[in-house]
Amino acid sequence: MLNQGSIARRIALSHLMVILLTGLLMGAAFWLLLSRHLEQAARDSLQQDALNVAGLVSGLPSEEDGHGGMMRGMFTYHMLGRVIQGEYLLVNRRGLVLESSIEQIPVGSVLAAGVVEQIVAPGIYEGRVTLGGERYVAAGRYLDQQTNRGSTVLLLTRVAGLDEIRNELLVLFLISLSLAILVALGMTVLLARHISRPLKLLQEKAHRVAERNFGWQIEVNTRDELGELGQAINAMDEKLADYDRAQRQFFQNASHELKSPLMSILGYSEGVRDGVFKGAEARHALDVVARETGRLKNMVDELVFLARQGNPSQIYNFEETELQEVLEQAVDSQQVLAAERGVVLKLDAPSEVLLRADGEKLVRVFINLVTNAVRHAIKEVQIKAEIQKGAVHITVRDDGIGFTSEDLQHLWERFYKGARGGSGLGLPIARAIVEEHGGSIRAGNVPGGGAEIEVIMPIEN
């Protein structure tokens, strides 16, 4: 059974209403057309027979006294497989009935004035006439075809007989229509169920996704919009499952990364408070607390920045920005770290390359990339910019051991740290900013040794 209010039920009811309305319209049209066809066919047959009969009796004498019963008998017509009884009248010029097969109109009767002309005269005949209290379809011919005067042969058939045929045909039509409605209704119910089944599956899938129950793939084996919707929901399920796993991993990593500096801060601060560290040790403890506090602050700032990405509150101030100036600021900010590690920073960038960018955030991108390169470099880090096909390619390359295969798989994941890595947030932040500028970023290894990260940015026209 179809549930009340369901889409399948509404589809079935709407189809049934359309079928019934179509049936009613077809029935009405069938009734009108059939009535006209039966009367027209009867009239044509009567006119032809009247012409033939008029030709047979036109030369016989004794017009006023009839023709000796030559016309006695019944006329019959075959119409749509049925035999229809016909009647005849022979009437003189004064309307006196000379011969008749109709009991209600015996010989010697006089027809009402104008009846003969109504039947015979062209342009006046309307198809039906009432004689003796009964309706007939009639046709007539004058015996004298030259003058169209004198005695007249009238052939008639009862409208009731035609109505019987029409009613029988209408009953057959209604029976056929009822059977067609039943078949169509059955097909409609099957179609509605065929539509409702995948919809119920999609509904169940949506409930499971709402409950964070991922992994169940629905099978909608239709090549239509429902099939496409099923595929889209399955794809959404996979992406939400990946996102859920990433979020869980993110919170696990975040809690671990935040816990490490907090434990250091807590331990050293309690040691200073309790007098465990004194003198130089106390000063060292305070240095550790300050360093870990700064690291914790930077980590929180990076988490806040990542959380704002894609949010309307994260506003980018796009303006004309000179690339060389951006790269020089990033390199200058890392000179101290590079000097501590004995690494030389080399910058090669063309002047007067303008970008439509948020300069402050773009500086942050290259600070993260240069910092990461300095951590892994042995002696040198190269920052080089080249213009290629309407875009600028900026490469940050070190001479270290390069990325491992595992690094390349997880490099852009939050909190992923390779050997000598930082917070694990620098590269995800760089990627988010670059993509917000309509650019792209990739990582790989240099054939001669070392790692490189390439940023491709569109140049302002």
Image (cartoon, grey):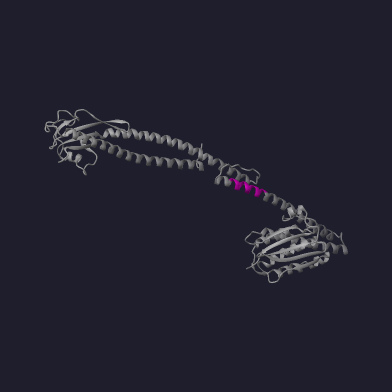
Q: Is residue 8 left or right of residue 95?
A: right
Q: Is residue 231 found inside the magenta-colored segment of the image?
A: yes
Specify the segment rendered in magenta: 230-241
Q: Residue 45 versus residue 323: which sits nearer the camera? A: 45
Q: Position of residue 67 (x, y in %)?
A: 14, 30
Q: Position of residue 252 (x, y in %)?
A: 74, 51
Q: Is residue 279 left or right of residue 163?
A: right
Specify the farthest residue to the bottom. 352
- Which picture quadrant has residue 184? top left
Q: Evaluate whether residue 83 shows in this view.
A: yes
- Which picture quadrant has residue 177? top left
Residue in the picture at 82% in, 62% down: 378
Q: Position of residue 213 (x, y in %)?
A: 65, 45
Q: Residue 173 versus residue 275: which sits nearer the camera? A: 173
Q: Residue 125 versus residue 259: which sits nearer the camera? A: 125
Q: Is residue 358 left or right of residue 62?
A: right
Please say if 242 is above or below 38. Answer: below
Secondary structure character of the magenta stretch overall? helix
Please say if 67 is above or below 225. Answer: above
Total numbered labels placed on residues in the image: 0
Q: Position of residue 82 (x, y in %)?
A: 31, 31
Residue in the picture at 72% in, 53% down: 250
Q: Residue 15 versus residue 48: which sits nearer the camera? A: 48
Q: Is residue 314 left or right of residue 98?
A: right
- Which picture quadrant has residue 441? bottom right
Residue in the picture at 32% in, 31% down: 81
Q: Evaluate whether residue 137 shows in this view.
A: no
Q: Is residue 269 found inside the magenta-colored segment of the image?
A: no
Quarter of the picture holding the C terminus: bottom right
